[in-house]
Amino acid sequence: MDDPAQTTAPPPSPHLLIAAALSDPGHDILLADNADTLVYIDPPSFKSTGHLQPESPSCIPHRVNSQNLLRTESLDLTRPFEARKLAPTIKRRGLAGVLPSGIRYVVDLTPPSEGDEAVTFTTELSCPLGIRTWARSKERWGLPEHCVGGTDENEEGGSQSALPAEYSGSRHRRGIVDILKVLHYINPCLDTPCKMWTYFALAKVLGIATHSEINVHILTWVYDPDNTKFIELHPEVAYRIACGIQCERMCQDAFSILVGEEALLRLADAGKEPRLQWPSRTIHGRPREPLEDGDRQRVEYASHSLLDRVIDRFLELAGADMLWFSQITAYHSIQAHTHTCYDCEHAANLVNTLKQYIRGHIFTVLAVNAGTAVTGKLSKKVVADDSYPTQDFVDACNSMSLPERIMTYSFWKGLVVIDDVSHRLFNPGPELGIRTLADVGSPLASFLAQGSAEIGNVDLSDLLLRANQYNRHVDPMSPRFGFRTIAMECIIEARTNTGVLGPLTWQHLASIFNPQDFIDQARSYIAVVAEQMIQAIRPDASFSITDTLTCLVDSEIQFLPLWAGGNEDGTGGVYTDQGMAELDTCGFSMFQPAVPTGHTVPSSISFPGADTSMYESTVQGASHRATASHLTDVMSVASEAFSAFSEDLSEQVDNIVPCVDQDAGTLSTSSGKQPEQADEDEFCVNMDSSADDELEDYFDTDSDDDDGGTAMVDSSGAIDALEDVAAGLERIDLGDVEAVSD
């Protein structure tokens, strides 16, 4: 992540400024050349005696230039220079008529000890828990010494291992000195998280946090290359800092993490009673810190938009329609054929098989039991102690239902991997029962509409069987496709009617469907979509721990303020027309978080979703046995029979392929063969990795074939091969399937 704090500080003042360390460690006295102002910052117990001789180093006034304070236009820094304030301060300090040479003003910046002003300072300067604990991660994350190597006051009565005090009067006074330093072009000492927060909070209260000369030191601390994990581990704190200094980059980074986490929580709560409190932890186990009601509202609205968009993107890939097939070049031959051959059952069967094959691959990746993907970027210290991230973080994906995993970086990262040399996609396994997206995602409304999107056990052999059927229908002289597995590599090969056998280097009619090209192009398309989903909110943002999606776009960013790149101008107009689906449709409720009106309105009730009782998790009973695609034995182009194809599913296919025969067939997962379709094995090729003379047995030509010269297959060999493979497999359910790896 690049450093946004590249703004250079203003050139040094022509007057020499000296920070002199006296006997009190860490207590600097500012002595500016040609100074015209004395600034007092007294300790709480100090009582002015009217004598010029200071009682302790902490009582020595700082000598500064008035113009450096007045140019800030901060009321808290300019009001003390008013005549009605100056005279009482000079008199109280015993300096009436005896001001040191060159001194014109005497200013008292001592923190107030009572009243509303004291409450404001104490509240704003109280360090969040994430700030107080950050230095403890020094060894774990290799945090820089200049950011966390200093010392803070521990809790009263605590040991050296105790957390720093939430509020410290001495830290408050030192923070004022740091502000004065920066106003005179000297770097502050922000060597602890608490000092950084105090400096930031003081600048915010004084109304100067947005000044570049002030906030550049905050940005430098946060975006130090070895310290940027602070944003990921404490996004609420980072978001508060970003809003205080109005840093668009930091605001969007932290906001995207908060929105992704909230979207996953929202999905996990689907169908449950509305939560009345802000959840204390994320699904991955990260402790959440407080946010203002208005900021929670931004996060909730944006998370609703992100969740809808991610689910829509998933259903575009795996839903019933799969309109993206039209962008696959290898699919164009089918489209061209259906323009001239209406009600083509071969095309309809092939399209349906392609959909189930792709859908099976996507759900195999979704269902695989694996550690959180981002842990690969981290050292083993990810679970080194009890602080986040813990082992629960590593195992989070395995604890989620299948729909919940759609919101994770780990799932989409799994779809990006396309360097597998095998010309096939991951396969669910031979014992996967026929189910639909509606069954898996029920009762989410968007999934319920996918009742025709079957997740069947369609493997590569099934796909090649349908491809051979279709190609013979289009051109009786077309090649026959088969595959074999050699040393874990799946090789698709074709046999032409002239006796040529080998890899697909041949040129043929454009009307022929090439399954190898389709698989390669589909893999690439899915990878491109997945790559888009795992991108951060900005191209130069980089998150190494976050496992929720952070790919926010304008529809989510719009809820941020104008200065952060959003559309929120303070009127609440951005929240209009953001109605949410009624609860009885299994969507989100119409409850609207309060629109900012200048008052703080609690928004603890969140949007409920749909019931998750039907979700399935792969936590228990995960299979660690290899699936069929792991084997190096001969892989058969299946001798599967076909079952009747239902009219309602045919209508779904008809949305993509106009020429669908309503009586078309679909693949059956049974091992039997129906009598009326006994001749369909002739369209499959069972290829062994042995010598070519053995392969010839699978390419016997039947000259009496009605379509002329088509390749015949000895189905007995295919059945024997299938039985050998099946003997080495155990029953694998969708929730327990493991992804194929090379």
Image: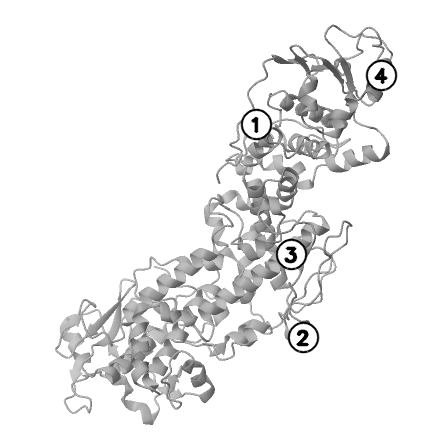
Could you say which disc has been placed on residue 682 in the image?
A: none
Q: Secondary structure at mark 1?
A: helix
Closer to the chain start, of discs 2 and 3, is: 3
Residue drawn at 67 percent across, 75 percent down = 584
Q: Quadrant of residue 127?
A: top right
Provide the residue designation for mark 2: 584
Residue 495 on image: x %, y % = 18, 75
Which residue is most to the bottom?
676
Q: CA distance from mark 1 to mark 2?
A: 55 Å
Residue 560 on image: x %, y % = 62, 50
Mark 3 burial class by Cα count in 10 Å: few <14, some 14-19, many 20+: some
CB contact under 8 Å: marks 2 and 3: no
Could you say which disc has been placed on residue 146 in the image?
A: 1
Question: In this rendering, which labeled residue sits more in front, label 3 or label 1?
Answer: 3
Q: Secondary structure at mark 3?
A: helix
Provide the residue designation for mark 3: 574
